[in-house]
Amino acid sequence: MKNLFKKLITTHPNWGFSIARLTLGLVIFPHGAQKLLGLFGGYGYQGTMESLTTQMGLPSIVAFSVIMIEFFGSISLVLGIFSRFWALSLVGMFTGIIITTQLEHGFFMNWYGNQAGEGYEYSILIIGLALSVLLNGSGKWSIDTIISKKQ
């Protein structure tokens, strides 16, 4: 268990990895805040759960996971704590989003409102940033770095 914890927080003290982690966390945070708290014009927890389960047909555990990953994962990424775990969670989540809802709409986002849905270009960017964090850790300025130095 100690080995797993050490692998989870080990990071390369590099500015670039910190930038990738912060960008990922800051971009995902508003989406999580919409889903959990109803901020930024979102539905809040109850509305999002209803939308994801009834309209999209997701199992309630998946809908709950989406909300938790986007909200708590984004905050954890900004702080740089357990970033590899949250990055892996985002890779899985956005891969699922591509497969279940975006693949049929092609690559491009629905910039002009003339497609039936969103393409997967945004999701590919999220996955790319998350893979960088997953492979390299939280970077120079992170709680993971502070914890790993004390180990």
Image (tube, rainbow, N blue to C red):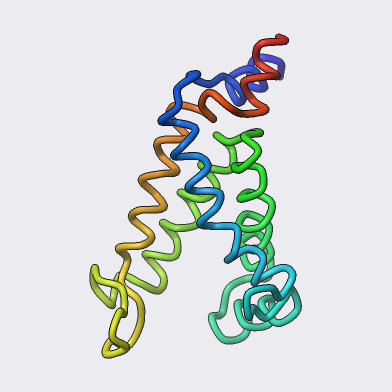
- Quadrant that contains the C terminus: top right
Q: In this view, does 73 lie to the left or right of 126?
A: right
In the rendered image, which quarter is residue 144 located in?
Answer: top right
Q: Is residue 108 left or right of residue 143?
A: left
In the rendered image, which quarter is residue 81 located in?
Answer: top right
- Quadrant that contains the N terminus: top right
Q: Residue 48 in the image: state x and y as whole percent.
A: 66, 77
Is 9 or 13 nearer to us in this picture? 13
Q: Residue at x 51, y 56 (%)?
A: 27
Q: Which residue is drawn at 48% across and 47% down?
A: 23
User: How many discs appear?
Assistant: 0
Q: Which residue is drawn at 36% across and 62% down?
A: 122
In the rendered image, which quarter is residue 77 located in?
Answer: top right
Q: Residue 89 in the image: state x and y as whole percent.
A: 55, 47
Vertical comparison of 95 with 12: above or below? below
Q: Residue 65 in the image: state x and y as whole percent.
A: 65, 59
Is 113 or 97 nearer to us in this picture? 113
Vertical comparison of 116 with 108: above or below? below
Q: Residue at x 68, y 82 (%)?
A: 50
Vertical comparison of 13 with 22: above or below? above
Q: Is residue 1 left or right of residue 70?
A: right
Is 126 or 3 nearer to us in this picture? 126
Is 18 or 37 nearer to us in this picture? 18
